[in-house]
Amino acid sequence: MPTHAWRKSSYCQEGEACVHISRTPTAIHLTDRPTPPQAVLTVTPAAFAALVDALKARTPLTPVTTP
């Protein structure tokens, strides 16, 4: 597994209820614990931006299909 520079979400609760984010030019990586990450969700920057926009607007996401 590649090494990531994980950052803890600023909306983190006390304890382990956190989302950690790492980014590269082509991907956004999300995990619930950075050391060691158990499962990592990797999405494109566009997909991550759509998720953040939907969360801010509190609207449901439209399913995305890949070619």
Image: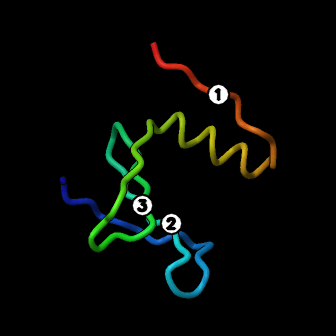
Q: Which residue is mark 3?
A: 31
Q: Is residue 50 above or below residue 28?
A: above
**Pointers 2 and 3 in contact (C-beta within 8 Å):** yes
What kind of residue is marked 2? Val
Element class at badge 2? loop
What kind of residue is marked 3? Thr
Residue lying farthest to the top in this orientation: 67
Q: Which residue is mark 2?
A: 19
Q: Give the crowd class for mark 3: few <14, some 14-19, many >=20 residues within 10 Å.
A: many
Q: Which percent across, then down, holds residue 63?
A: 64, 27
Q: Which percent across, then down, holds residue 25?
A: 33, 41
Q: Which percent across, then down, holds residue 26?
A: 34, 37
Q: Which residue is mark 1?
A: 63
User: Whole-Å distance between the Cαs marked 1 and 3?
Assistant: 21 Å
Residue lying farthest to the bottom in this orientation: 14
User: Whole-Å distance between the Cαs marked 2 and 1?
Assistant: 22 Å
What kind of residue is marked 1? Pro
Looking at the image, which residue is at 29% across and 74% down?
35
Left or right: 50 as drawn, with respect to 32: right
Looking at the image, which residue is at 77% across and 39% down?
60
Mark with earlier residue (2, 1): 2
User: Whole-Å distance between the Cαs marked 2 and 3?
Assistant: 6 Å
